[in-house]
Amino acid sequence: MTTEASVRKFFSSSAFAVVGASSNPAKFGHRVFTWYLAHDLPVTPINPGSATISALDENHPTVADVAALPNPKQTSLSVITPPGATLKVLQEAKRLGIPSVWLQPGSFDDEVIEFVNEKGAFEAVVAGDGGRGSEGWCILVDGERGLKGAGKL
């Protein structure tokens, strides 16, 4: 599957979650979570260290981990964590049947990429070189084009 097709598949989900969501506006976990909110997408912040995430002048309840998502098999997952944490999140996501993942720049290394590309791991993976930004596929840069491709914008 091409990355563009993976982006469309990612956005075909009925729910989304952001691992590494943050209340700190300087962090990408905040920017990505806010991007989903600004596009009126149903998104759940995942942060084990905080009961809520403050974004767009509201507090949004978090879940502690991927296993706490209400409908993991219908949820696409954006990941903004260091590679070691990302691998653990993805192992749980695979076990739960998460269909699609988007690995933000900086969230993966060779071991993570090898894992997500294993046959049957995920239906769609967005990660690595490409996209319109200089650091690879980023939802902040490439997300709107993906939403359009999936007929959601």
Image (cartoon, grey):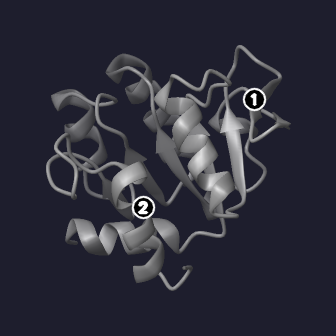
User: What secondary structure is found at the residue carrying circle 2?
Assistant: helix
- The reply, left or right, for residue 49 in relation to residue 89 is right
| Vertical relation: 119 (above or below) 58 | below
At x 20%, y 40%, the residue is: 135
- In the rendered image, is residue 68 in sight? yes
Mark number, residue 23? none
Of the residues shown, which amino acid type is indicated by label 2? Gly
List the single residue furthest toward the top.
49
| Vertical relation: 106 (above or below) 66 | above
Where residue 89 sits: x, y (%)? Answer: 49, 31
- The reply, left or right, for residue 147 in relation to residue 44 is left
Q: 74 or 24: nearer the eye? A: 24
At x 61%, y 42%, the residue is: 33
Mark 1 or mark 2: name the one nearer the start of the chain: 1
**Disc 1 packing (10 Å; few <14; some 14–19; many ≥20):** many
Q: Residue beneath label 1, please?
A: 53
User: What secondary structure is found at the residue carrying circle 1?
Assistant: strand
Q: Residue beneath label 2, please?
A: 143
- In the rendered image, is residue 121 in sight? no
Q: Which picture quadrant has residue 5? A: bottom left
Q: Quadrant of the N terminus?
A: bottom left
Where residue 8 sits: x, y (%)? Answer: 40, 74
Q: Which picture quadrant has residue 74? A: bottom right
- The reply, left or right, for residue 94 in relation to residue 124 is right
Q: Which picture quadrant has residue 54? A: top right
Of the residues shown, which amino acid type is indicated by label 1? Ile
Q: Could you tell me how far apart the alpha carbons at marks 1 and 2 are, in whole angstroms?
A: 21 Å
At x 47%, y 46%, the residue is: 94
Where residue 50 sits: x, y (%)? Answer: 76, 18
Where residue 63 sits: x, y (%)? Answer: 76, 32
